[in-house]
Image: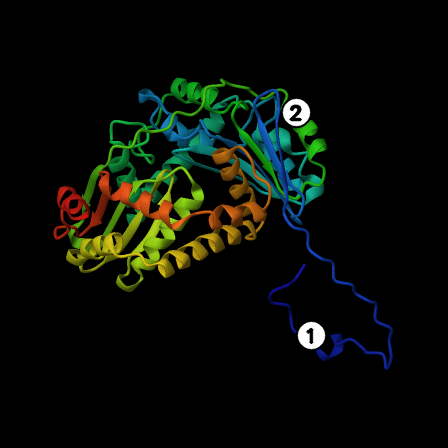
Amino acid sequence: MYDPDPPPISHHDAPVLATSCSLPTVTPQQSKATSASVTTLPSGLTIVSESASTTSTVTLTFPKAGSASEMLDETGAALFNKCMAFKSGSGVSTLMINRAIEDGGGAPFCSVDRNGAVLGYTVIPDKATGLLAFLGTDCSFEKWDIRDAKAVAQVEIETANASAQVVLTEGLFAAAYGPQSAAGRPFFTGDAPSMDAAMAFRARGYGLNGAVLTATGVTDHSAFCQAAADLLSGSPVGSSAAAVAPIYIGGESRVAALSSGYAHVALAFEAPASSALVGTIKQLFTVLGSGSGVAGFSTKGLVGVYAGGDAPGGLVDSICSALTATMSPDVIKRAKSMAKAEALFALDGGSKTLADFMTATVLESGSFTSPVDVAKAYDAVTEAQIKSALAAMLKSTPCMAAVGDISAVPYHATVAARLS
């Protein structure tokens, strides 16, 4: 393993070089291109794997375990259950689960948002299959695990609520879907769910039916699928009902902090279904706003622009200028190139990023083949599609969030009128 800061070699440690030596011949090996195989098991679990990576990241994604799937009395259950990941279950203790993954040379990780939860680990390819069972354990909710999960969740809530960017994002979702909906309610809420509610949420959201198991660096897809079927045979299957998509309505959220001297403003619209089109529009917003500090962004179901600064009065002017600027063919071409490069870079950013990208693609389209097809999807985005999508966005009701010293930030109705 490469040592980034090796100790200096002293005179006594210096190697003695022979006057003549025979060096081995090194033949460079051509790297393999990523190609993937997709299989759906009788349980409803979809498995996608590829063979080119030198390390293996294995993730199990539960699309119905995000906070947008919470019932009214389950607020906070998604975050709490994420903190229960890799805890005791299926007759195996928390210590044994985590020690087994660590003994395999990996470290467990987990994440959750409004649209789902992910459990995973990254190991050498030889260890990828043997640890599968720990991704699908049937959590037994031991009292010590509950205690620890509540403590971790509280730390995450406090950290998130102290971040202006997180508060802005939370406000954007509230504006987009309404505070009365599960997708619009605060994700980082201090209200812990009851254990009955948390357990009911887990039983409904953490089933294999509709979940996606993704693995990089797996050379034999069929063998991996068989191992997954065997090792996850005792995991909850769950309902076949698909996750319910939130209904976009548009609106406004404002959080004032007059002493901050800085304002953050985000304006977004409901995103098109095509991720290639969304990525292109995001980059188009960045190109159009580059001279005024406006950047495009996309998040689950939304695409829009962000600006921040200590002159709040001009932020919305810059945002509206970027959204209504004239688009030349050269600007559109540049945005398409940037979007395609971003997508291909994600594929080449390591096994974890590759696994995330493969999962997202399978959830969107039901398949994933290779980077060639990813590039083709971006190349296929036309100028007419971009202009049509933008025209529809500007005619719709935007969602707007503002945080900080926002006394000079216009209200939603004023901004919407400038865009229509």
Judge by depth and name the residue closer to the eye, 267 or 57: 267
**Which circle's residue, 1 or 2, is located before the other in the chain?**
1
Q: Quadrant of the C terminus?
A: top left
Q: Position of residue 101 (x, y in %)?
A: 63, 38
Foreground of the two, 171 or 302? 302
Residue located 42% across and 22% down the image: 201
Q: Is residue 231 left or right of residue 201?
A: right
Local SS, label 1 = loop
Residue at 58 percent of width and 29 percent of height: 46
Foreground pick, 410 / 273: 273
**Which residue type carries mark 2?**
Ala
Measuring from the top left, give residue 184's x and y in whole percent.
29, 32
The label number, if any, that marks residue 229 in the structure image: 2
Amino acid found under the numbered disc labelled 1? Ile
Residue 52, position as x, y percentages in the image = 66, 47
Asked if labels 2 and 1 touch by Cβ distance under 8 angstroms, the answer is no
Mark closer to the observer (1, 2) = 2
Q: Which residue is mark 1?
A: 9
